[in-house]
């Protein structure tokens, strides 16, 4: 394990880092489906999700819980390590036979590490279309911070490539030897898969969505397929066997230009997810108190937009 530990476990990545802006930004909602699909393309992960997950019966709840968990890894402070322990406890009993007939356990280092590893190339691919591409220095910082997230999740350093130079050969080997179009991949990328209407939010909204769902679902499902496949790294897309046309690529680039123009100028209360907003506001308040000797800083309006792309 890393020497960067606290009595309660490894700390999350630092405030102000790359992940501090990345994980709470609403654009993460567009990049997550690609990462999740890459995860379940692993025969063991796909088998575990197929058997144990409630993604078919409670997709909205599962998505909400997964998103909150990821937010805690970065913005949770002391709660980050506890969330990592909770996830390991939850996966302790998940085992069986993978899609190739091999025994698996969810916490086996090779399996658990792959689930974590998919985040790094997914972030890079998302940035390519939805924001300003990272500089070399930012890319290295992102990888270092993602390694720290792995430690929060309880992954040993020996089970994670420790540098970018070590990561890419590992990643390419996984694509060549392990990744495939598992049944769960096919289900997640099928625009005709049934999805129940949202069951979160105010009751009048839920009733309205339930009434309109037969009309709303087809275009939403096509959009989900579009961003899932399009924002997946091309080599992963090819390894899984997902089709992507030149026309789709042009459409994705147009969509990306719109996202890049709109999201950076949104107010913080819209651009960032709730847990991220709270953590960012608390960090700013602590910083203002530190530089002003404990006196509130009233010169800056709270919630001012962060215009970094």
Image (cartoon, helix red, strand yellow):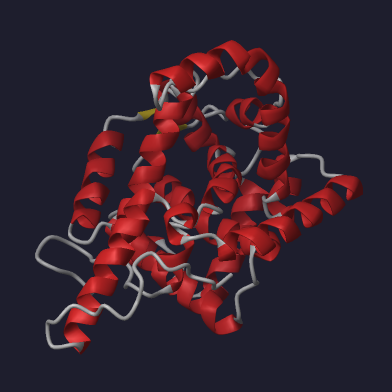
Residue located 66% across and 36% down the image = 224
Instruction: Using the rendered image of the protein, determine whether residue 103 is visible from the camera's viewpoint.
Output: yes
Residue 19 placement: quadrant: bottom left
Residue located 81% across and 40% down the image = 243
Which of the pair 254/119 is nearer the observer? 254
- For the N terminus, the quadrant is bottom left
Which of the pair 79/263 is nearer the observer? 263
Q: Taking 278 as reference, is 175 left or right?
A: right
Q: Position of residue 178 (x, y in %)?
A: 60, 44
- For the C terminus, the quadrant is bottom right
Residue 302 in the image: above or below residue 233: below
Q: Position of residue 164 (x, y in %)?
A: 54, 74
Q: Residue furthest left?
A: 7
Residue 11 placement: quadrant: bottom left
Q: Taking 25 as reference, is 234 left or right?
A: right
Residue located 18% across and 77% down the image = 296
Q: Residue furthest right?
A: 247
Q: How many marks?
A: 0
Residue 46 in the image: above or below residue 251: above
Q: Position of residue 226 (x, y in %)?
A: 73, 40
Residue 129 in the image: above or below residue 248: below
Q: Position of residue 57 (x, y in %)?
A: 46, 17
Instruction: Using the rendered image of the protein, determine whether residue 196 is visible from the camera's viewpoint.
Output: no
Residue located 26% across and 50% down the image = 84
Q: Taking 178 as reference, is 160 left or right?
A: left
């Amino acid at each position: 394990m890393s020497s960067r530990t606290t009595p309660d476990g490894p700390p999350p990545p630092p405030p102000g880092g790359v992940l501090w802006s990345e994980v709470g930004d609403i654009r993460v909602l567009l990049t997550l489906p690609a990462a999740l699909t890459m995860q379940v393309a692993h025969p063991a992960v796909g088998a575990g999700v197929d058997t144990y997950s409630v993604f078919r019966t409670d997709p909205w709840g599962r998505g909400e819980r997964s998103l909150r968990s990821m937010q805690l890894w970065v913005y949770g402070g002391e709660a980050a390590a506890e969330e990592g322990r909770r996830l390991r406890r939850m996966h302790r009993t998940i085992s069986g036979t993978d899609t190739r007939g091999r025994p698996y356990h969810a916490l086996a280092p090779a399996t658990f590490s792959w689930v974590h590893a998919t985040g790094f190339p997914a972030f890079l691919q998302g940035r390519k279309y939805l924001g300003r591409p990272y500089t070399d220095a930012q890319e290295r910082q992102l990888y270092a911070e993602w390694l720290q997230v792995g430690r929060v999740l309880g992954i040993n350093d020996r089970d994670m490539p420790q540098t970018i130079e070590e990561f890419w050969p590992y990643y390419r080997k996984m694509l060549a030897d392990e990744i495939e179009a598992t049944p769960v991949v096919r289900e997640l990328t099928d625009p005709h898969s049934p999805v129940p209407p949202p069951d979160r939010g105010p009751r009048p909204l839920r009733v309205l969505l339930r009434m309109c769902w037969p009309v709303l679902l087809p275009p939403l499902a096509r959009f989900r397929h579009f961003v899932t496949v399009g924002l997946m790294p091309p080599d992963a897309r090819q390894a899984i066997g997902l089709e992507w046309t030149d026309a789709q690529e042009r459409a994705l680039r147009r969509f990306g230009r719109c996202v890049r123009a709109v999201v950076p100028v949104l107010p913080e209360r819209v651009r960032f997810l709730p847990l991220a907003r709270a953590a960012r506001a608390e960090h700013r308040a602590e910083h203002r108190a530190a530089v002003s000797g404990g006196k509130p800083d009233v010169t800056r309006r709270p919630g001012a937009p962060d215009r970094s792309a």
